[in-house]
Amino acid sequence: MRQTEEKKEKRRKVIIKTARKVFAKHGYFLTTVDMIAKTAGLAKGTIYLYFKNKEDLFFSLLEEGYVEFHKYLIEIKEQPIDPLKKILEIIKLEVDFHQKHTDICRLFFNNQGPDIENILPKFREKILKKHELQANIIAEIIREGIEKGLLKKADTHKTAITIMGTTHSLLMSNVLGICKSHRNKKDDISFLYNFILTGCQK
């Protein structure tokens, strides 16, 4: 029984991994379950044993990525270190995640816009909820920094959104090959940390 469950989980991971690459390459609309099955070396019917349809598989990809990121974000928040170091650790997490999961990042970028939001309204709703959860965690860290006199008094939620937006913009430019001057991991971390603290630190 245990071997059967392990086999199922292993196959599910293969499907997820393959679907990430196919969706990232072709986008949501051009990708079919047939394409994913063929690329994974599986029968089309096997995909449906794990996912209801293409939409279910697509959301599962995004969900797994956000769950992993959220888990690490919580761990950083609960570390017994000062808020400035927590901000640095969040930036490191963002950089590492983008490098480790380039396919997920490209998948997210390539599947935004009014067309997919109109056809898949749950897409926008799910993404907004995940971003809000992440922003709230970062806002708590900023609030802690303000209370300890390490950061300037400011709207914590707006500051958190600004930090997220600045970080994501630079890292996504790397993923898409737009920004060629910041492809070094250490340089990205240093640049983002100093840039963010210039506006936040006392």
Image (cartoon, rainbow, N blue to C red):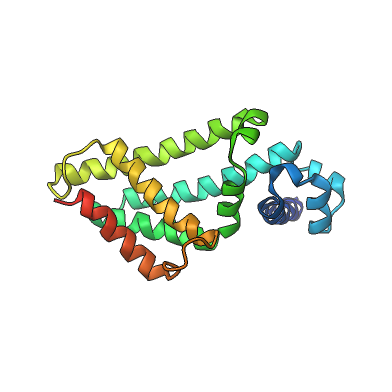
Residue 17: x and y, percent?
A: 68, 56
Q: Is residue 42 left or right of residue 82?
A: right
Residue 98: x and y, percent?
A: 50, 58
Res. 170 in view:
yes
Q: Is residue 74 left or right of residue 65?
A: left
Q: Is residue 123 left or right of residue 136?
A: right
Residue at 58% across, 43% down = 63
Residue 50: x and y, percent?
A: 75, 43
Res. 82 in view:
no
Residue 141: x and y, percent?
A: 27, 45
Residue at 37% across, 40% down = 135
Instruction: Looking at the picture, tell me which residue is in the foreground, 71 or 31.
Output: 31
Number of callouts in the render? 0
Residue at 69% across, 37% down = 56
Quadrant hosting residue 123: top right
Residue at 47% across, 50% down = 69
